[in-house]
Structures are given as C-alpha cells and as structure tokens.
C-alpha cells in the first residue's frame, strides 16, 4: 500500500513511523460521519451548554495559506490600507506620562498632600504601602505648536514634531506588573504562548524583501524587557513568523557569515541538500516547524548579503549620524533608530525597538525621576525626532505607522517603598491610565483622544483597551481583526482574543 | 422455594416519578436558561411545553374539588378517583417541566421571571408527587392532615408557577396592562409599562425619549424588557437599546443600513427574523422615524424639536468592507494571467492592492539595482491598473518615463534615490490621479516643477536632497505642496 514494500525493513519502519504520526485527534475527527454522531452532535453539544451562536463571530476567515517554500511571501491586505509597515517603539518599564505628556495642574496643587483613601481603595500596588503622598509633575510643562499639545521640557527635539503625533491618553490595562503587562501589549494576552503583534502582521501580510526577516527586533537600554523574548515570539503560529532579534552593531546575527574556507557555492550546495531532505520530511509529516527550519536556513543565507548592509550605519553620512546622536560601535537607542530607518527603506514589514529602563520607582538613582529618567529621555528624544524627520522627508511617513508607548502608566502618588522617603523621586505602577502616541499613515496628526481625571490617575473619557489598540493597528494595515486568525486548541485564535474590541475610529484620518 | 419478592407497581411508579423529578431538577440547576438559542430540534420539542402544561394544571385544580366533593353524600363515589388523577397529574407535571426546561434552554430565554417560573414548576412537580404518595400511603389522621397541607401547597405553587409563566409569555404586567383603572387604583398597581430610571439619556425632552422610546414600549418591551429579554436584548432604556444583545449592537448610530433593529422591523411578516415577533408590523411612520433617528446618530440627548436634516452624526464605529469574492474575481479576470506571469518572474514586486480590489501595487524598491528599465517595460499590459508604484533605489532612468506616465491611475509614486532627471517629470502632466510624489535624493531641479503645477489631486511632493532649494521660484500651484 502506498508504494510501501513491507518485506523491506526500512519501508516497514517508515510505514510504522508515519502511522504513529496519526494521533487520537485524527481518529476522532474521522468519526464525524457516523449517524450516531450526527444526532449526538446536534443534541449533545447544545444540551451540554454549547451555544449555537457566538458573539464576535465572523463568517469567513482569511485564507493565509502560502507555498511552503515561501512562508513569508507578501500577501495583499484584506482591504486597501495606507500603512505598509510598522515601527513600534516600546519603552519597557512604563514611562511616566505625568512627566512627559500629561499636564495635570491640579496634581501640582495637591503636591505633598496625603493621597485620598478613595484612590487607594480596592487597588493593588506593586510597591506603595500605607498612605502615599500625591506628587505633582516633576518637570515644567508648556504648550507647543498648532495643536497646542502640552509637553514637558524633557523632550525638546520631539517637540518640533508634536503636530505630527496622535496621542491616546486614555489607554488602560488590567495588568500591574511588567512581564504580564508587556505580554498583554505585545501579544494580546498576559500569559505566555501567544503570538506577538509583529508575528500576526507578518503572518497576514508577509514581507516584501525576502532577504531580510519580516519582523526584526532591536534592543537597547542595557537589558532585555521583563517579558522576555516571548514578546516577539510567534506563540502558536508557525515559528517562521517570530521576530528576529538583531544586534545593532557588528554582525546582525551571530555566526551569520560562512566560515572562511566555505565558499558561497559550497554553502549553497549544502543548503540545497538539506532543503531536499527537509522537504521530504514535510511532505510525509506536514509539520509546519519543518517549513520554518527550511525558511530559516534560506533566510540566513540571504541575510549574509543584505543584513550586514542594512545594519551598517557606517554607510550613513556623518551628518545623519549626528542628527540621530548615534555613535558607531555602541549599542544604543539612537543606533537602533537609524538602523530601523534603513530597515524600513529595505522593505522590512515590522520593526520593533525596545528601550529598557523607564521603570521610575525612585528606589535608586538609576530608576528615579530626577536622575535615571533624565538620562532615558536624553537617550530617546533626539533619535525619535530624527527618525520622524527622516521618514517625513522621504515621504515614508505616509505609509509607515509609528507607535510609541509603555505597558502601563505611573501613579499620581509618590512611591513610598517600605515607608521611606528618599532623595530619589519615583512613582509606582498604574494600570488605570497611560499614554501612547501614534504617527504616520492613517492617523490624525496633532490630535488627542481620550482624557484622564484631574490627577491623571484613572481614565475619565473614552477608555481604550489594549485590544482596541491592536484592532486599530490591524485596521490601519488593512485587516478586520476578527478575520485574521489561526486555529489552535479548538478555537480560531486572533490577536484581539475573545473579548469584544473596537477600532478607535476617532483617531483615524 | 421462596418466590422472589415483587416490587408492587405502585412503589415502582412512585420511585420512577421521583427519579424523573430529580433529573429535571438537576437539569434546571446545572443547565439553566442563559439567553442563548440552541438547536432548532430542541426548540421544536420545547414548544410542546405550552401544549403539555395545561393538563397537569387542570388536574391539580381538579383534585381539591374531588376531595371536597367526596365528603358529601351525593358525590362520595368520586373518592377513589383522586389517586388516579394525582398519578396522571404527577406524570403530566414531570413531562411539562421537562419540556419547559427544553424550551427555556433552547429558546434564548433568560432573566428573573423564567428562573422563578422554572423553579416553581419543579417544586410543584415534586409537591404533586408528594400528594400522590401521601394519598396512597397515608393511613393515619396525621397523614391525612399532611396530605391536605401538601395539596394546598401544591395548588399555591402551581398558581405561582402559572402566574410567572403568564408573565414570561405575555409580559410582566400581563394582568395589569389592561386592568380597568378603578380596579388598578383599588389594588394599588400601576397599569402599563414602567418608566425607566434616572438617566442622562432619553429624557422626555429628547427625541429618543419623546418619540422613539414610546414605540419600543408599545411594540418591543414585552419580550425585550427588564424581566424578559429574548436574545439578551433590552429595549426599555436608551442605554440598553444601544448596548445591544447577544449578537452585538442592533443600532449603529449614523448607519441605518447596518442596524439590525431596523432591518428586522422592515422585513415581511412571514420572514423568520421578522420583528416584532408574533405581532403585526410597525406602522410605516414609526419605522421611518426610527430610520431617521438612527441616521442622525441614534442620539440619546438630541432634543426632540431638532429637524432631522440638521446635525451630522459623528461616526464612532468603523465598518469593515465586505467583499464579494465572485465580483472581485470578475474584475481581475482580464489581468489575472499577466499578473501571474509577472509575479512568476519577479516575486513580491507586484500584487493586488487588497483582497477586494483589482488595482495593482508595484514595489521594486527592495530589489534595488536588480530592477531596471527593461523590467519595468514588461508591465506594459498592466499599466492601467497600477495605483501605487515604488521604484526607489532601482536602476531605472529617464528611459522609463514612458512606462511611468502610461500608469494613468497612479496615486502614489516614489522615485527616491533613482537616476531620473527633469526630463521624466516633464511628462507627468498626464498623471491626473497623482496624490503623492517622492523625489528624495534625485537630480531634479526646480525647472521640473511647473510640469506638476496643474495636477489636480497632488498633495505632497518630497524634494529633500534634490537640486530644488527652498529659495527657488516655484509656481503657485505646487509651492505649498513641497516637503523638504
């Protein structure tokens, strides 16, 4: 049967191995045709509590199948979209919105007073104990530009671009610690195991330049964010869609280059042989991870040529490097921004920049608002402004979406860890309200959506959940977030998960 | 040999019925009605509840009459009948309760009324069984007294269950709705539908409160109200109406075409989805009023004296475009072969703009110098369909001017870092649809700009790192569109 010759021991071994690949699920699935199961299927399901209808249901998911040799090939979006690529800047640690974009004069008036009990009731804090004191903004604010946005004095370069930014000041989350909150922002779920935003995007859209990964991650600030590498992982999607973390100086990926005495053609021959073996394996077992393996080998071969060129900021003129504040040989946010722009020019679909160190608790100099925070702002202010200006002058801001934000906000109260008052000022985590901004194609420049209360503690108007932000990003890329899904664990999973989400239409052009 | 002890039929009957009641009680406890509709087969059987329920009720009302009649000399012969009647009533109440559960579970019922009705019925079924047991086995005076008490309790419970059942099917105020006013006053009940509680929306001065809410109250709130809300939809207040039900929102402000409520009330009465269910259609004027109210944004605060043609509604929801794959395929049919051929030769360069469009997008930027004039000319059959072209970084030159200007429907054109010169731009006068043009890092000068001045839709021209400088004299029509 099937060309197997059972007298040949190798054949029979192969047959048994392929039979073992048939699981109980395959068997049960094949039972569906029986008459008994037809009746049971109609009655038992409803009897046992399964509803015949579902909210958030869709009619037809999108067909995202591709040739297994080119899993990252570009696909058109569901409907016409302005945005073709995303640059997501995640400030890990949660930057204090009250010291950057949220001007709260009322909070200034109550500076130093005990926090009212109503603000503390029912809340869980990471470090605040007892009754903390309210703390006004630590830096002076002023209004800028035609849009009249308020901004502190910490971001003088970004100020010049304030009229291009679209703020959402009423972001909300339900996670109060870093790792789950970062996972929620990046994967839509506070638990591990779910694909990240970038993975969904390259799953839905692919990438144009097959010589570079479609989803590239660059990290700065000294540490990997608390959520770990799962923040750009592919979850249950085939792992070919995961983010590739590249180093921003030296070899973008270690050991990318062939050893000295292996020529390109030799390497190519080797890869062709490995490819063929993997393809045979795939046609027998159909394991999508095999496709990933093939794709990664191919990708690393092509990256040898293109990636080093893309990541090499030597090739930029001195003036440009000064504009970003980037220095050759360093690993910095400025370098990452410049590399990010080069990657955007070369057709990378999703570029993610993580900058660590915004967790301004005030427990030591490094994470205090009066010292560490100042350094962080200096590190990001100039590069972001330079990136915006570069993209704008190339006309790339029309079809790029830039997102900047953290994972939650910071409290209006000063953090009083173990009841002590130190010379370092800081704020604790506040999932109740935080600010993000977007810029680029499809979003209204110079616009603010949503408001927080007078103390900047809770959202007062137009709350936006993380899943709403995800729905909006997917909409800008040309997808109905309910239709971009992948079957896993009996559910057609989607980035926005099972709770209803809405696209924030108010910020759309 | 001892004969095996036989269980008497009576005992068997008593045990079987008790077990059945417990099954129904467990179903009610663990799988209560939750507002979801389930299999139509279940709903079909569930509807039999209405048929089946009247018999046990009638029999249970009959039993006290039989007992009372049995005390008289004239009708003493009816005394033995009550056991039989109670037995039939027990079976009947079990069947009715079971079918009632099937109906509630499958028919999308939820709420306080249905739950109370369900439990009252289960208790009534149990009490009926108790009455039967006591009547059969009670020999002592004490037992007979217990029987009388149980019988009274059963009748009372059945009355409660029946009253709730009436409220479930006819509405919460089914007895008071048409009660004559003097009688209503005497009893201290308010006839008609209750007014909604304090809310900033839907007050008497608003359009909703004055015109729309009364329509809902008259035709809809019976099944979509406070205590009975089919499909988890309530229409007894503004907030509830806009909140929607288990299928999502039924009213979309500013978009009457996607408002499910409006769709359903405009169907033909024979349609399965027609609303109001089991009643006649709304008057034309009322339907029109609801349509108007929705198109102006379905506001809860708009005053009732504002004309409908005044304010524009702010759209607070996006609607996802719904594509018909057959229509899209038809649009693509004439170019499909050429597109496939080009894609074969240059993968990931040319593709449709979206899954619901036949327009094409060209992006050769990532190919850099591997894409040139000759390759662009291979697109000659498709130039009319290209709406966006990115040829940045490629090796094209002025020789491609003809190919580019043949793309009459081009909206976005990027030529960054290419070797084109003013010559190419001079032929751009025919690109009537052009909105965005990027010439960053090219050799163009301000002499080329007049050619762009008359393009009607042009929004931005990116001229950074070109020979155009801010001080150059440029035509009016293009000066404010330049981005350096």
Image (tube, coloured by chain):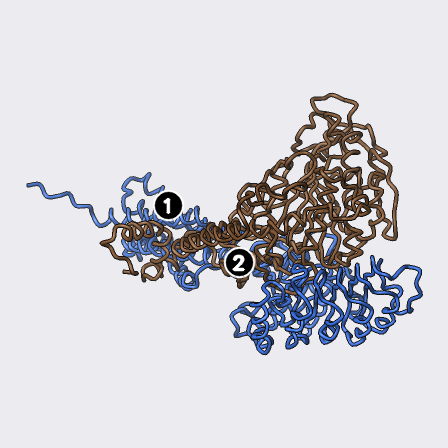
Chain colours: A brown, B blue
The picture places residue B234, in percent across and down from the top left corner, at 61, 57
Residue A70 is tagged as 2
The C terminus of chain A lies in which quarter of the figure? bottom right
> Above or below — where is B152 with respect to A81?
above
> Which of the pair A486/B113 is nearer the observer?
A486
Q: Where is residue B420 in the image (x, y as percent from the top left)?
A: 77, 66
Determine the chain carrying the residue at label 2.
A
In the image, residue A265 above or below residue A193: below
Q: In which quarter of the image is residue A182?
A: top right
- The percent coordinates of residue B233 (x first, y second) are 59, 58
- Front-lying residue, B450 or A228: B450
- Between A112 and B94, the one nearer to me in the picture: A112
Estimate the spatial distance between the alpha carbons at disc 1 and disc 2, rounded to whole Å.
82 Å
Helix, strand or loop for disc 2: loop
The answer for which chain carries disc 1 is B
Tell me if B136 is positioned left or right of B326 in this view.
Answer: left
**Quarter of the N terminus of chain A within the rendering:** bottom left
- Crowding around mark 1 (Cα neighbors within 10 Å: few <14, some 14 to 19, many 20+) is some
Q: Which of marks 1 and 2 is in front?
A: 2
In the image, residue A267 above or below residue A416: below
Q: Where is residue B398 in the image (x, y as percent from the top left)?
A: 76, 70
Give the side of residue B50 with respect to residue A169, left or right. left
Query: Can the viewer see residue A352?
Result: yes
Residue at image position (72%, 21%) is A419
| Residue at mark 1 | B148
- Along the horizontal axis of the image, is A242 left or right of B453? left
């Amino acid at each position: 049967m099937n060309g197997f010759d059972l007298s040949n021991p190798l054949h029979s071994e192969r047959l048994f191995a392929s039979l073992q690949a048939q699981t109980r699920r395959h068997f049960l699935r094949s039972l569906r045709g029986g008459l008994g199961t037809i009746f049971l299927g109609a009655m038992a399901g409803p009897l046992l509590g399964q509803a015949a209808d579902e909210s958030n249901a869709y009619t037809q998911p999108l067909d995202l199948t591709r040739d297994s040799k080119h899993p990252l090939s570009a696909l058109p979006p569901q409907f016409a979209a302005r945005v073709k690529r995303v640059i997501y800047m995640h400030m890990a640690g949660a930057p204090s919105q009250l010291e950057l974009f949220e001007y709260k004069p009322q909070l200034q008036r109550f500076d130093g007073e005990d926090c009212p009990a109503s603000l503390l009731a029912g809340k869980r804090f990471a470090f605040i104990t007892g009754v903390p004191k309210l703390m006004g903004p630590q830096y002076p604010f002023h209004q800028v530009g035609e849009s009249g946005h308020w901004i502190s004095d910490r971001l003088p370069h970004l100020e010049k671009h304030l009229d291009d930014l679209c703020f959402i000041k009423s972001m909300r989350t339900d996670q109060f610690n870093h790792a789950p909150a970062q996972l929620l922002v990046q994967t839509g779920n506070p638990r591990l195991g779910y694909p990240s935003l970038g993975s969904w995007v390259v799953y839905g859209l692919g990438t144009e330049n097959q010589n570079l990964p479609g989803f590239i991650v660059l990290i700065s600030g000294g540490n990997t964010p608390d959520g770990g590498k799962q923040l750009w992982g592919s979850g249950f999607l085939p792992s070919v869609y995961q983010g590739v973390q590249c180093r921003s100086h030296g070899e973008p990926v270690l050991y990318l280059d062939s050893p000295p005495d292996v020529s390109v053609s030799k390497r190519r021959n080797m890869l062709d042989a490995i490819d063929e073996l993997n393809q045979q394996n795939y046609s027998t077992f159909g394991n999508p991870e095999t496709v990933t393996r093939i794709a990664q080998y191919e990708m690393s071969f092509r990256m040898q040529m293109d990636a080093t060129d893309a990541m090499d900021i030597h090739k930029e003129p001195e003036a440009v490097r000064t504009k970003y504040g980037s220095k050759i040989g360093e690993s910095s946010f400025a370098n990452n921004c410049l590399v990010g722009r080069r990657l955007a020019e070369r057709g990378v679909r999703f570029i993610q920049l993580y900058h660590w160190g915004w967790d301004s608790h005030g427990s030591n100099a490094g994470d205090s608002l009066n010292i560490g925070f100042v350094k962080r702002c200096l590190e990001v202010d100039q590069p972001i402004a330079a990136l915006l200006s570069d993209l704008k002058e190339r006309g790339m801001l029309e079809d790029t979406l830039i997102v900047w934000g953290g994972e939650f906000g910071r409290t209006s109260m000063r953090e009083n860890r173990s009841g002590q008052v130190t010379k370092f000022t800081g704020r604790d985590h506040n999932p109740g309200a935080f600010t993000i901004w977007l810029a680029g194609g499809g979003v209204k420049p110079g616009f603010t959506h949503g408001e927080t209360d007078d103390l900047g503690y809770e959202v007062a108007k137009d709350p936006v959940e993380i899943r709403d932000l995800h729905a909006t990003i997917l909409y800008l890329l040309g997808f109905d977030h309910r239709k971009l899904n992948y079957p896993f664990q009996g559910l057609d999973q989607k980035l926005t998960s099972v709770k209803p989400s809405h696209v924030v239409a108010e910020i759309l052009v | 040999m001892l004969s095996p002890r036989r269980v008497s039929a009576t005992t068997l009957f008593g045990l079987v019925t008790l077990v059945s009641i417990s099954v129904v009680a467990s179903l009610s406890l663990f799988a209560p009605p939750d507002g979801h509709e389930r299999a139509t087969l279940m709903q079909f059987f569930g509807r039999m509840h209405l048929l089946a329920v009247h018999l046990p009720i009638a029999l249970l009302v009959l039993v006290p009459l039989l007992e009372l009649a049995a005390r008289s000399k004239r009708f003493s012969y009816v005394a033995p009948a009550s056991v039989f009647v109670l037995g039939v009533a027990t079976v009947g109440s079990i069947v009715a309760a079971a079918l009632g559960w099937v109906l509630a579970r499958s028919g999308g019922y939820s709420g306080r009324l249905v739950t109370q009705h369900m439990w009252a019925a289960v208790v009534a079924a149990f009490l009926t069984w108790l009455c039967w047991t006591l009547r059969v086995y009670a020999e002592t005076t004490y037992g007979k007294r217990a029987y009388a008490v149980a019988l009274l309790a059963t009748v009372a419970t059945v009355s409660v269950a029946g009253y709730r059942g009436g409220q479930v099917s006819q509405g919460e105020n089914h007895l008071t709705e048409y009660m004559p006013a003097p009688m209503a006053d005497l009893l201290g009940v308010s006839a008609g539908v209750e007014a909604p509680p304090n809310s900033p929306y839907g007050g008497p001065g608003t359009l909703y409160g004055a015109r729309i809410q009364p329509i809902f109250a008259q035709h809809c709130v019976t099944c979509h109200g406070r205590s009975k809300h089919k499909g988890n939809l309530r229409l007894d207040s503004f907030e509830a109406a806009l909140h929607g039900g288990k299928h999502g929102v039924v009213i979309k402000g500013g978009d009457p075409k996607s408002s499910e409520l409006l769709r359903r009330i405009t169907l033909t009465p024979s349609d399965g989805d027609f609303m109001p269910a089991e009643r006649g259609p709304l008057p034309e004027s009322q339907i029109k009023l609801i349509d108007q109210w929705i198109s102006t944004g379905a506001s809860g605060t708009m005053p009732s004296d504002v004309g409908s043609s005044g304010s524009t509604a702010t759209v607070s929801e996006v609607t996802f475009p719904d594509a018909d794959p057959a229509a899209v395929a038809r649009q693509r049919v004439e170019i499909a072969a050429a597109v496939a051929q080009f894609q074969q030769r240059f993968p990931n360069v040319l593709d449709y703009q979206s899954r619901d469009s036949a327009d094409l997008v060209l992006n050769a930027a990532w190919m850099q110098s591997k894409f040139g004039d000759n390759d662009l000319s291979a697109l000659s059959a498709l130039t009319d369909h290209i709406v966006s072209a990115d040829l940045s970084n490629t090796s094209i030159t002025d020789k491609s001017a003809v190919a580019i200007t043949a793309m009459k429907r081009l909206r976005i054109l990027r030529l960054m870092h290419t070797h084109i010169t003013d010559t190419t731009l001079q032929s751009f006068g025919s690109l009537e649809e052009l909105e965005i043009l990027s010439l960053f890092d090219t050799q163009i000068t301000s002499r080329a700009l007049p050619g762009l001045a008359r393009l009607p839709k042009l929004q931005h021209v990116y001229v950074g790192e070109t020979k155009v400088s801010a001080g150059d004299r440029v035509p009016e029509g293009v000066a404010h569109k330049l981005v350096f």
